[in-house]
Image (cartoon, coloured by chain):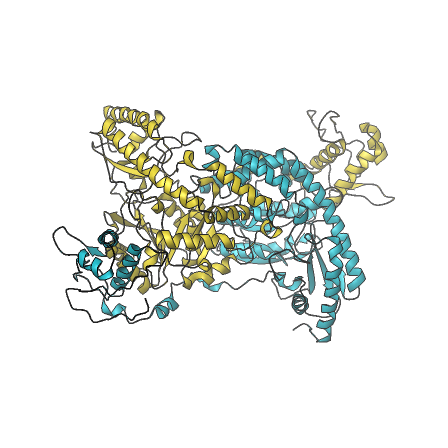
Chain colours: A cyan, B yellow
Amino acid sequence: MNRPYQLKLPPGAVTSLLLRLEPRSATPLHEQIFEGVRLRILRGELASGWRLPSSRQLAAELDVARSTVLQALDALAAEGYIVTRAGASTRVAPELPIAPEDRPRSHASRMSRGPRLSHSARARKPIPVGAPRLGTAPRAFRPGVPALDLFPAALWGRTVTRVHARASTGLLDGGDPLGHAPLREAIATHVSSSRGVRCSAEQVFVTTGTQQAFDEILRISLDPGDAVWVEDPGYPGVRRAVLAAGGFPAPVPVDSEGLDVSEGIARARHARVVMVAPSHQYPLGATLSLVRRMALLKWAERTRSVIIEDDYDSEFRHRGRPLTALQGLDEAGCVVYVGTFSKSMFPGLRLGFFVAPPTLVDAFASTRAAFPAPASALEQAALAVFIEEGHFARHLRRMRVAYWERGEALLEALRADCAGALTPRDCDTGMQLTASLAAPLSDVSVRDEAARRGVEVAALSEYAFSRRREAGLVFGFGCVRPEALREGTRTLARALEAAQGRGGGIE
Amino acid sequence: MNRPYQLKLPPGAVTSLLLRLEPRSATPLHEQIFEGVRLRILRGELASGWRLPSSRQLAAELDVARSTVLQALDALAAEGYIVTRAGASTRVAPELPIAPEDRPRSHASRMSRGPRLSHSARARKPIPVGAPRLGTAPRAFRPGVPALDLFPAALWGRTVTRVHARASTGLLDGGDPLGHAPLREAIATHVSSSRGVRCSAEQVFVTTGTQQAFDEILRISLDPGDAVWVEDPGYPGVRRAVLAAGGFPAPVPVDSEGLDVSEGIARARHARVVMVAPSHQYPLGATLSLVRRMALLKWAERTRSVIIEDDYDSEFRHRGRPLTALQGLDEAGCVVYVGTFSKSMFPGLRLGFFVAPPTLVDAFASTRAAFPAPASALEQAALAVFIEEGHFARHLRRMRVAYWERGEALLEALRADCAGALTPRDCDTGMQLTASLAAPLSDVSVRDEAARRGVEVAALSEYAFSRRREAGLVFGFGCVRPEALREGTRTLARALEAAQGRGGGIE
């Protein structure tokens, strides 16, 4: 409708609706009439109480069938824009609260204000997440992406197909709010045998991943403003989850024995929750020592705090026996164990779980009551089958070897290409590796320089909370085939040189 | 290990580990040794610093290969329970904080305390949810369950299989945190054409369902304690979401024109959020009148509040044109439109969405940044295909007719079996019907009486917030085949008689 509206209309009785119809449009004619009249009423151009032309007049004016006009008028009446009464004329509804002063302000100026946000939403500063994502497909050296090239996608597809083919209406209906019962059984068996977690299926709650688990656990443990120990440096998703749940993240330093528990007690003794990755700290890779594990459990029992154990990547210990979970040492029911299938299967699956201590099972169950589990019922059922039939354990074994190979290949490539510039740390678990910068360079500028050349690495300093920031680079090698590593490290070497040449030192 | 432990051990040097191995167990022998020693250390029976027998002595004592013992000792050393040094004897780790006073308290008594819960978790009273669930399969007259018997499960299964067969690694990786782009496009097109929602795909955020959408929207809009208008009576999930987000639910009465906006302003003018189901209020079925829609929008614009439009069931208007969404009238960017595929597809799918106004897109995007969308990437992709290929629209059309038929059949069955006892309200949309009780009976006792006889109905009074509670029954007819309805209404008639006979009056 390009023709400008004629704004002055005869008061009380409208002789023409001044609509222009598009006979060739995909929108049916009656919809066009409906929408045209509706807009004119909302803009105040057809005012409350005004009389409209008869349907016969309108049909003649618009050159359409009378039934088309009646259809439009019926819809307008049904939504309350106009009032039709048998034997009487049709009028714009009398009580519509459209005053002339509503009109002058433009759409743009009204939109620009918008609703107020909560304090936390307004205060939210972007938390850096390490590596910039230079595209959608996984690439060197994006952290956190598993070896998707090795995932048995066809086998998984067949499992999903089979489950769909025999899906009951109970399964379509979503089933148990806590999670699909056979999946909870399969998870309980898996974490008991492979991670030393002591639990029964009743303690297992299915989630859509680690962030949802963190959120759910924090929300039953925290009051607004309560302190939460977070590892410094640590996984940015942890801080984000604490802030979103209204908690106050209290940074606790990490050293070669993992989280410094006595520092934590000294700095934030009234914390209600501790978030810790005892098996394999991110991004430094340390394992929490037994002495600290026991000190942490003792403190949590005494203060009745919750420990959230993020057992991230621990299934991928390259060689030897994986360390058992902190949860297995917990006698007082303080530890909630969090696991995910994002790495052991694939991130797009969005399935994870937590294991609640018996002390907290009722509290979690009551927050979930009456709603379906957050995760897809059919995919939960398929994953249960995949685990029960042994495909999952086989895949894990293959991945462990692949990550060993890829980790070793990366170390070799770094030795060959970046020997003087980077000192890698030990890497015996998972799909990430951290290396210190030899020269006093800003890791952020190295990262940005690498990104300009198409290589993703994360800056270690951005995982830090405190001022004392170590400069280094975090590499993900999960998604990179060994033969493709060299290209990445060569590019990185050039980026390191360029950063040094530019004097990209620490600001 | 049934043999009681011998607690007095020679201090400083242990001559025997007193372990009993089970050669026929599925647990390997080295694991049994590891676990046995570990437990004895944790119980304080093998104290810090004590010297263990040599691996040769242990192998002889336990009658196993020395390599088996070494494997167990390596694992114990790796986790920090023991200290081995070349040429020196093996000792229990010196600094373990296990004091004798840790021991006496029993596991049960320690567990019984457990961690503290947040105030909101402790204060959480079970919110009644209407119909008791008498089993897992859908049955008469459970509200909220769609016609799963009519869902084209085989077609959906084939779509899922196809998407899995050609899944890229990008899809396995989870893709866009806001949702799978083709699904967001398909949703934007669907809600624009069928619901009169004005949006582009950039405004669409994929969720795992209505509750997650409510939570996400409330958390960027509310500070702790902020008031939120909720419909009274209304959907219990709304109240639950407000409480979980730290808000204060302010009940606003509902009449035949829907939410009473002027009452809301009078009672809670400082509310930050309004939660409303304008198209089809639950459980009363009213449609929010145009006059009230415009008053609500005006108030929200002036106070910069957020309106959360729950457009629940509106796709299932039995006959005629569905009413357009409130969102389509919003010129100031206050309305967040919430939709779900739980009813239009099936509840176990866990896919839904919200449409943010342009004013709030950035705020929502920043809460999601850096994490995958909460919902399964492959199922999102499959749903996009299902919509694009027209299967979804065809299914919706069939469902509309089915719900019309089932609703009419229920009305007829109620007239035949419960005419004197129940007065059904109009029902022109969706899969639920509400009926008032003619006699002054407690609807809760009627519901319980029906449940004892195997029929699920919900008590209308339990959806109410205020003291002024109307007695009635809420029927779901979505999942009940027309021919199966009569059995349900006959049983219900007997339950009504029994409740009346017992004098199950209003307490």
> Residue drawn at (41%, 41%), measured in percent from left and top?
B395
Up/down of A82 relative to A177, above or below: below
| Image location (x, y in percent) of residue A87 | 11, 52
Q: What x and y, as percent, mark residue A29?
A: 30, 56
Camera-side residue of A247 and B131: B131
- In this figure, what is the number of numbered marks? 0
Left or right of A487 on screen, residue B227: left
Q: Quadrant of the C terminus of chain A?
A: bottom right
Residue B60 appears in which quarter of the rendering?
top right
Q: In the figure, A382 relative to A241: above or below?
A: above
Q: Quadrant of residue A231?
A: bottom right
Please identify the quadrant where the N terminus of chain A is shown: bottom left
Residue A357 located left or right of residue B459: right
Q: Position of residue A409 (x, y in %)?
A: 77, 54
Q: Nearer the viewer, residue B164 or B501?
A: B164
Is A18 placed above or below B248 here? below
Can residue B254 be seen here? The reply is yes
